[in-house]
Each structure stands twice: as structure tokens, then as C-alpha cells.
Image: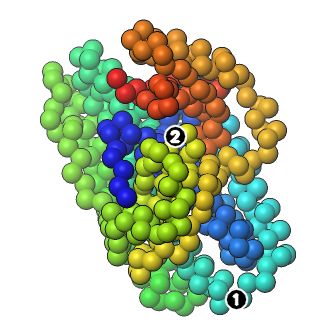
Amino acid sequence: MRYPISSFSNFLVFLFSSLLLISILQPCFAVREGTANANIMIKRYERSGDFGRAALWREAAAECLELISIPMTTLMIKYYTRYGNNELAEVSRKELTDIEAQRQYHLKHAKTYWEKSKTAQKDLDEERQKIAEFIATWVPHYPDKFYDFGVYANFFRKRRDEFKQNGDYAKAINIEANAAEMCADQYNDIPIAYFKRRAERAEKAKQAEAAAKYQQRAAKYEKVRDAQRQRAALLRALAQQPPKAWPPEADKREIEIPRIQTQLTQDEAVRAAESDRRVQELLKTHKGVHEYAWFQGFAWTVSFYNHGWGNLAIAIIDDKTGKVIDVLNQVGNLEEREWEEKEKNRLRLKKAEVENIARSHHRLASFFEAHSDARLSAAFSKRYNCWMVEVIRGDKEVGFVSVSDGTGKVIEIEIDQ
């Protein structure tokens, strides 16, 4: 069972599954992606009534917010403020408040679950080890992807390209240097800080082997951090010349990133999930199904979804054995379901207003001129913290537009022409 994925659909796999799409106005999806993946395990144990393990994963979700989301958002505020982007800095400050509310939400539920827990201590200890592997996998994720998505693609690169187009190469190079410094700061404040704290904790517990392991991990990322800082210094030197053209050296980012070793490949995880009878039964009545596998430190999650129903099934595959250990069906947007309906009353825009904003965008306007049968369908996504507007022709989704509820601006648009 293999589903063809077009270049456009491949992009949507990244958007609707586990890869990140950070918008400069709405950064929360990416900085909470670790929490969203923890929610898969929360739902698994809530469903089975294993409140001890569910409590641990609630605490893990809160820890992801503390270790990843808060420092990432704090760095955004720092850089937006430094370069005079007060509107984006204010959005990020509000985001910090929302992150803390979610963190407390998970901790509150964890406390309730502990009161119900009958899980054996041995099982709890085993789950804590899995959670440690899960978090160790997620803390370097965003710095490792810095130049692919997010604040670099939507903030630094856009500003850099504007200066390049105007022939102001010195300013463009300095923007690239600023980005390298932010990437270094992300490594410093997230994975390096985390692994150093774990090493210190292990040393106090007289766990020499564990302490050495965490120290080695920290040292690997310190090398990457230092390489980013050296690149920033080189770029600053290039900018001082001043250059009359864009120097090829400014595009070189040949920095080796530590790779996470897994027993299974991504394709093997997908094949294991596809062969499971529960998955086959859940998908047999659905069309246009796509899949995406993501490593969670100790296991793979393979999400099967289409854009009409969202997540149809998520299979959890043990990385060591290759066996499907559980299947969750129609889990949908887990993070969004967590929040009370009253949260949606805070929205500034209405569905019809959002659809009009999307339709008026020049790219959509030209698309509708050529395809009068197309229609739009808008819904607010708590997970992405913005409006998602599907572009539909017949029964097929051919594009999407994301719109900020706070500013009414189009954040991202993708259309299959």
C-alpha cells in the first residue's frame, strides 16, 4: 500500500504531519511540535487507562515547552527587538504567555493522573527512560533545521534577499551573519544547555556512564555552535570590504551536524505500519491518503492522513524490533482538541472574513480567474495558531493559505497550478 505524493502534496506532508512550518507571525506550531508528539503518547495511555504513564507524558509535554518552546521564543523576541521589529516581538511575547498556560495545563492534568495511577514502579522507570530518549531527540531538532524553515526562511532570508536585490551586499551579508548568530544561540540555549544539565544531574547521582554520555552530546553540539559563530565572524569580515557583488562564501554552510542513529529507516517504519491490519482496516474507505514517519527517540510514529479528515491513523513502531506496538485512530489535531471551545471565542476574525482575505491575495485572485469552480474552506487551527484556508476543486484539495488572526495578513500560500 503506497500512495503517490506530488511535489505539492509532499509539501503538505511537512505541514500537516511532523515537520515544521514556522511563520514569523505565528511561531507556535514549530516550537511546540515536541509537545504535539508527546500528545500521541498521552492519548495512547489515556485510552488504555494507564494514568501513571499518561502522567509522565503530560510532564514530558510540559518539559518540551520549558526546554524548547520558551528559549526559542525568547530568542525570537531578542532578535526582533534588536532589529526593530516591534510588532513581531510583541506577538512573540504574547506567545510566551500562551506557552506558559499550556505548560501549566499539562502539569495540572499530570497531577490529576498521578492521583489515579496504579502503574507499577518498574513500568514507570522504563517509561522515564523512553521519555529521556524522546526529549534528547527533540532538543536539537530546531537548530538542526534552522536554515530549512522558520525564522530563517521567513525573516532573515527575506530581509537578506531584499538587500541583495537593491545591490546593498554589505547589509545582506550582515543579515546572514545575524542568522548564523541566532542559529548558534539556539544550539547554546536548547540542546547544549539540556545535555549539560543532564550531565550534572547524572554526576550528582554518581552515574558516571550517563554523565559521560551527556557530556559527549553537549560537546558535539558545542562544535556546531562554535562553527556557526565562526561563520558569522567570517561574514562580518566580508561585509566590511565592502563587496560589489554577492560573495560565494556567503552561501557556504558546510557544517557537520550530529546525526541520530536509528535501527529502522523512515521507509522501513512506513512499511511496517502499512502492513498492520488495523491500519489497513482504518484506511480502506479513504482516498488520497498520505503517510509520514517521524523518529521519537525510542519509536517511530507513522501518521496516515488526508486533507479532508486530517489524521486517520497513527501507528507507533518500536525502533529496535520493527513491530507495531499500537495504532491510534482518527486522533485528529491532538493539541487543538486539548483546549476548551471557549478559547476560540478569542478569535478576532470570522470564517467569511478570512476566506475574503485569502481570495483577495493576488496569487489566489489569478487562480480563481482561471478556475472559477474552485472554492475555499477556512478553519482556525490551534496547533498552527492561525487560520488555515483550503483551496478545493471538486473533491480535491489543491492548495492552502494560512492567515494570521491577529494581523489579518497572509502568512503562507501554496497552490498547485
What is the crowding at mark 2: few (fewer than 14 residues within 10 Å), some, or many (at least 20)? some
Task: Verify CB contact (< 8 Å) between mark 2 and mark 1.
Answer: no
Residue 299, percent from left and from top: 47, 71
Identify the residue position indicated by label 1 in the image: 121
Residue 155, percent from left and from top: 43, 31
| Badge nearest the viewer, 2 or 1 | 2
**Left or right, residue 405 beside residue 189:** right
Q: Amino acid at mark 2?
A: His
Q: Is residue 134 visible?
A: yes
User: What residue is rendered at 85% in x and 75% in y?
Assistant: 115
Residue 329, percent from left and from top: 60, 59
Q: Is residue 180 visible?
A: no
Q: Nearest the camera: 73 or 340?
A: 340
**Left or right, residue 64 beside residue 2:** right
Identify the residue position indicated by label 2 in the image: 307
Q: Amino acid at mark 1?
A: Gln
